[in-house]
Image: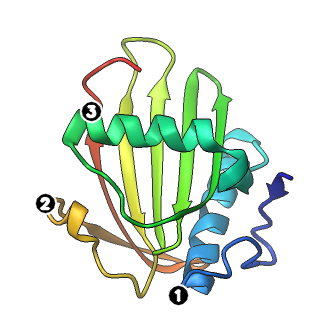
Amino acid sequence: MPYTVDFDTVSTAGLESSPVAGALAGLRANEARYFRNKYGHVFTVEPAKNAESTIDRVSRILDEERGIVIRSRPLEATDFQVEDIRFSYVFYESGLSINVMYSVDSAGKRAVGFKLSEGMEVPTELDSFKFARQKSKLAGTIRGSYFVIKNQY
């Protein structure tokens, strides 16, 4: 069943098994606030078992673009389109959030973003990336990185 992420009252619902559940919930709420403010989009997620196609798509892009295989267990995912951009998000038990931003227009932007919850170490599969820090009222300190998608998916 889809869960509407509330950024006014941050909840760990669906993320309880994560050792950084509170920080991951804040990260998820931060994304919900961004999409509500920028696009008027209500950010919903569903349990990983109901979002296999989204998780498979994100995993395929990571593997084919950079040979990255995430070892952590996915907890939740979402896939939606706003304006001409398709977004896919996967939230992992380790506290990692991965998003794929894929413009429907072939000339548009296409990238994979990584965000680490506060208290989470950089996973070994992402050691080659440099992470910038940003402050968030909802998520504390978020560390993020990205790469540009070169192929078509």
Q: Earlier in the sequence, mark 1 or mark 3?
A: 1
- Alpha carbon separation for disc pair 3 and 2: 16 Å
**Position in image of residue 16 (x %, y %):** 68, 81
For residue 75, which quarter of the picture?
bottom right
Q: What amino acid type is highlighted by mark number 1?
A: Pro
Q: Residues within 10 Å of mark 2 (few under 14, many from 20)?
A: few
Name the mark on residue 64. 3
Residue in front for this viewpoint, 11 or 32: 11
Cα–Cα gap, marks 1 and 3: 29 Å
Q: Secondary structure at mark 2?
A: loop
Foreground disc of the pair 2, 1:
1
Residue position for label 2? 128
Hey, what amino acid is under mark 2? Ser
Q: Residue at x 50, y 65 (%)?
A: 73
Return the x and y of residue 60 as percentages of the image width and height. 38, 35
Q: Secondary structure at mark 1?
A: loop
Determine the residue positioned at 68% across, 57% down. 32
Residue 19 tag number: 1
Q: Is disc 1 surrounded by few (<14), some (14 to 19) or many (20+) residues within 10 Å?
A: some
Residue found at the very far right of the displayed protein:
1
In whole angstroms, how far apart are the C-alphas of marks 2 and 1? 24 Å
Q: Nearer the viewer, residue 140 or 152?
A: 152
Circle 3 Cα neighbour tier, 10 Å, few/some/many (<14 / 14–19 / ≥20) = few
| Image height of 18 relative to 86, above or below | below
- Residue 106 drawn above or below residue 109: above
